[in-house]
Image (spheres, rainbow, N blue to C red):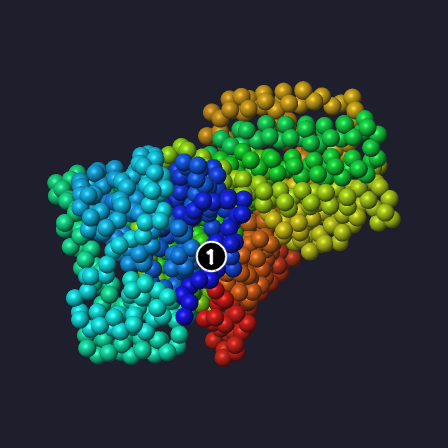
């Protein structure tokens, strides 16, 4: 028998550039401050990827201390090392497998000092493994605030383990922690399993230990035997079948003798030990004052005020992103356009470059860079606001706030946490569903996530509201977000009544204490998300813009088109005109074919929609053709810099006209905004288009994540369901809004949409109730 020597978390898969001296794994319960410790230790020297074989986010960082390069792993939060079946939370399974595989040279167990009793269960299991380990007792300030005093020396003596008190949020104790990491990297724990009082348990562990090969020490054999009695899925996979038969016999003997399962008895023994430990080491002041967290929660978690406050917070986020972030958008737009579009065109023309090369590099690559860079202020502001909410402790409460409403609809309240993540990007929202313990709830959450307006959609909303809704545009954006949430809930309700029948799992979740956000931590989180978004978006936008530039510059005969009628003769124009009739019922006319092309390219990524529209409308208006004498390099940069104070000066007006503050009149009157306004059927046509963008086909990255997480059948279903809903909602809205113009055709369209929706839901319900084994299986949702 060879125990857990191979794992999906094998160290060979780590970033080879780290050249580490040793590896440290941070282990702890969710919301114990583990990620804050990770950021304090590693700073900006981090890598974010996925665990091999799965799409759960994996964070590694590099710490250089005393000439040692230490690789730090931030493992997903877990409450215990007990994984008895494949239906357990995937985050938890990954953390457990990594720990049990003993890939780390040192484990740092991070505990919440204000909730010590609950966090010690995982500590007990780690100590039983007798691996090199030390304890970081975090949130000492919160414990003091609650009147909790911990006898650190006594606790360290009882656990026979080094304990370092820290306040990671305030960067207190981190230097001591680094020192202890280096000193104790090879000092294994000497904790003994001496808390069992049932003789039959002791005898079972002893007998099973004797069957294990002599390549393990007596303590290792004891630990393996304990894990086998608890039915640990990973240990069982590595043990000989002969030993498993004896384990089953002992398990049955224990049940017959004590009338209880061995895993329950072992857990009870640990909790008895923890209770004795608490009585010896923890002193709680009974006269402690009510904390600020309690005061705030009495308001924000109030049954009546909770949801309105949550909606106000979300509204404030949109306001901050569109107006505060938007004040810097002209700087990035004008500056990057001067450098990469106008500057590139001017330079290439003076060098005598052929027209086709200017089109590809300036109007293609340059316009792609310009589009990507312009996302920075609005998307960055939204990520910054989300990081502030998360670091303050409010975001964890959103699930509880929405739990009552969602459970009334038969939906799990915990699903709302991944859905909130979807405000940033739908891909991590899909991945975040792995934190749900119930498979049905996981699938349900994944299917609901694509309806959440991601940051890429926010960029589209900002452009359209600036062009069509200069007054009250923030209300349109807020309404779109609410429609997305509503459609997500309706989709979940439909699935809960058909394919995913069953009761939602109860919501049990720890609420961290409120605290003032740490600026360094918030900025680091926001930067990491923004950087990931820009790289992901840029990799798609740049080639798409180059392709669009090429297709816009050549006609079907292969010759370059640069005359006044170029846009009408190009390859892209002809293809766009062929597809556009499909979208005519939602108000997209034949001459607005760039809007259709934007929807098609948006399948790759919603970020690409704005890049497509920007490139096509610019070429339709011949905005990309620059005369040599019209270019002023320093003048363009000066205009970019001056736009910042000019836009900031308008923030006072943003409370009454939020979108107008980021949409100067001269931009709306000419250029791309002006062409968009001319081509769409007014505000009604713009809203119909935005509804389609909100609801249709999730981007390729999201579909790939869904395919991996919950099987291809569900991913394909999502493609057809979201696109069908998007078409029905946008067409239905446009037809109702323009009913007076063509009442008969509008009536037929609306009636047809309602009938198609009813037939689809009925078909899904019949399909779910039939005995046919459909591709994804009623309960065989995931391969993981």
Question: Which residue is depicted at the point 72% across and 39% down?
Answer: 364
Question: Which residue is depicted at the point 55% across and 35% down?
Answer: 376
Q: Quadrant of residue 468?
A: top right
Q: Which quadrant would the N terminus be assigned to in this image?
A: bottom left
Question: Which residue is depicted at the point 84% across and 35% down?
Answer: 354
Q: Quadrant of residue 243?
A: bottom left
Q: Nearer the viewer, residue 591 or 602?
A: 602
The answer to whether residue 587 is left or right of residue 430 is: right
The answer to whether residue 746 is left or right of residue 199 is: right
Q: In the current view of this chain or complex, which residue is farthest to the front?
A: 214
The location of residue 652, given as percent across then percent down, is 47, 25
The answer to whether residue 381 is left or right of residue 109 is: right
Q: Is residue 108 above or below residue 218?
A: above
Question: Which residue is depicted at the point 87% across and 48% down?
Answer: 557
The location of residue 401, given as percent across then percent down, is 34, 49
Q: Nearer the viewer, residue 46 or 362?
A: 46
Considering the numbered disc 1 on the image, is that residue within a helix, a strand or a loop? loop
Instruction: Report if residue 213 is visible in the image.
Output: yes
Residue identified by numbered label 1: 9
Number of marks in picture: 1
Instruction: Report if residue 86 is visible in the image.
Output: no
Q: Residues within 10 Å of mark 1 (few under 14, many from 20)?
A: some
Q: In the current view of this chain or complex, which residue is farthest to the left?
A: 287
The location of residue 636, given as percent across then percent down, is 66, 23
Q: Is residue 240 above or below residue 653?
A: below
The location of residue 314, given as percent across then percent down, is 42, 42
Q: Nearer the viewer, residue 610 or 25?
A: 25
Q: Quadrant of residue 326?
A: top right
């Amino acid at each position: 028998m060879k125990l857990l020597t191979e794992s999906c978390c094998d160290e060979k898969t780590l970033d080879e550039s780290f050249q580490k001296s040793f590896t440290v794994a941070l282990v702890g319960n969710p919301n114990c401050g583990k990620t804050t410790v990770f950021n304090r230790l590693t700073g900006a020297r981090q890598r974010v990827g996925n665990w091999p074989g799965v799409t759960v986010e994996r964070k590694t960082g590099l710490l250089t201390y005393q000439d040692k390069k230490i690789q730090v792993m931030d493992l997903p939060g877990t409450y215990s090392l007990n994984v008895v079946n494949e239906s357990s939370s995937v985050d938890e399974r990954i953390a457990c497998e990594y720990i049990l595989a003993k890939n780390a040279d040192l484990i740092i167990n991070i505990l919440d000092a204000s909730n010590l009793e609950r966090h010690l269960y995982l500590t007990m299991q780690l100590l039983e493994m007798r691996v090199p380990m030390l304890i970081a007792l975090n949130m000492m300030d919160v414990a003091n605030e609650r009147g909790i005093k911990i006898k650190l020396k006594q606790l360290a003596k009882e656990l026979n383990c080094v304990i370092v008190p820290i306040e990671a949020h305030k960067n207190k104790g981190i230097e001591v922690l680094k020192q202890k990491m280096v000193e104790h990297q090879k000092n294994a724990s000497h904790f003994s399993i001496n808390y069992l009082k049932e003789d039959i348990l002791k005898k079972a562990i002893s007998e099973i230990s004797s069957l294990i090969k002599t390549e393990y020490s007596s303590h290792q054999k004891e630990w393996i035997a304990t894990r086998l009695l608890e039915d640990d899925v990973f240990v069982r996979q590595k043990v000989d079948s002969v030993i498993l038969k004896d384990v089953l016999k002992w398990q049955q003997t224990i049940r017959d003798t004590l009338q209880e399962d061995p895993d329950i008895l072992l857990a009870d023994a640990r909790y008895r030990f923890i209770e004795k430990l608490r009585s010896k080491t923890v002193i709680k002041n009974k006269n402690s004052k009510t904390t600020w967290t309690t005061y705030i929660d009495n308001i924000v978690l109030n049954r009546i005020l909770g949801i309105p406050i949550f909606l106000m917070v979300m509204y404030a986020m949109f306001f901050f992103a569109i107006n505060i972030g938007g004040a810097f958008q002209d700087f990035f737009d004008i500056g990057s356009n001067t450098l990469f579009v106008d500057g590139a065109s001017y330079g290439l023309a003076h060098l005598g470059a052929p027209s086709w090369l200017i089109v590809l590099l300036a109007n293609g690559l340059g316009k792609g860079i310009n589009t990507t860079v312009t996302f920075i202020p609005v998307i960055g502001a939204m990520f910054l606001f989300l990081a502030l909410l998360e670091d303050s402790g409010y975001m964890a409460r959103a699930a509880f706030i929405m739990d009552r409403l969602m459970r009334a609809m038969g939906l799990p309240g915990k699903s709302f946490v991944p859905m909130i993540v979807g405000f940033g990007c739908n891909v991590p929202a899909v991945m975040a569903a792995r934190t749900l313990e119930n498979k049905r709830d996981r699938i349900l959450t994944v299917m609901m996530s694509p309806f959440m307006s991601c940051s890429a959609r926010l960029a589209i909303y900002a452009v359209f509201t600036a062009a069509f809704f200069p007054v009250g545009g923030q209300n349109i954006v807020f309404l779109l977000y609410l429609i997305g949430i509503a459609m997500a809930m309706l989709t979940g309700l439909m699935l809960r009544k058909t394919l995913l029948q069953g009761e939602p799992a109860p919501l049990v979740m720890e609420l961290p204490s409120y605290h003032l956000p740490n600026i360094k931590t918030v900025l680091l989180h926001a930067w990491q998300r923004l950087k990931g978004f820009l790289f992901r978006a840029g990799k798609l936008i740049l080639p798409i813009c180059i392709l669009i530039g090429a297709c816009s510059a050549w006609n079907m005969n292969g010759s370059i088109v640069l005359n006044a009628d170029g846009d009408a003769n190009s390859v892209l124009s002809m293809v766009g005109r062929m597809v556009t009739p499909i979208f005519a019922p939602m108000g997209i006319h034949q001459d607005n074919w760039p809007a259709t092309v934007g929807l098609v390219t948006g399948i790759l990524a919603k970020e690409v929609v704005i890049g497509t529209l920007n490139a096509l409308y610019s070429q339709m208006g011949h905005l990309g053709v620059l005369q040599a004498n019209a270019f002023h390099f320093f003048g363009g940069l000066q205009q970019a810099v001056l736009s910042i104070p000019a836009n900031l000066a308008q923030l006072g007006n943003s409370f009454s006209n939020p979108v107008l503050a980021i949409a100067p009149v001269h931009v709306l009157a000419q250029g791309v905004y002006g062409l968009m306004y001319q081509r769409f059927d007014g505000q009604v046509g713009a809203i119909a288009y935005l509804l389609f963008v909100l609801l249709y086909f999730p981007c390729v990255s999201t579909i790939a994540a869904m395919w991996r997480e919950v099987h291809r059948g569900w991913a394909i279903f999502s493609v057809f369901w979201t696109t069908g809903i998007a078409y029905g909602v946008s067409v239905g809205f446009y037809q109702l809004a323009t009913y007076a113009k063509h009442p008969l055709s509008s009536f037929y369209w609306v009636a047809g949409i309602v009938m198609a929706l009813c037939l689809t839901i009925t078909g899904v319900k019949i399909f779910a109730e039939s005995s046919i084994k459909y591709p994804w299986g009623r309960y065989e949702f995931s391969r993981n």
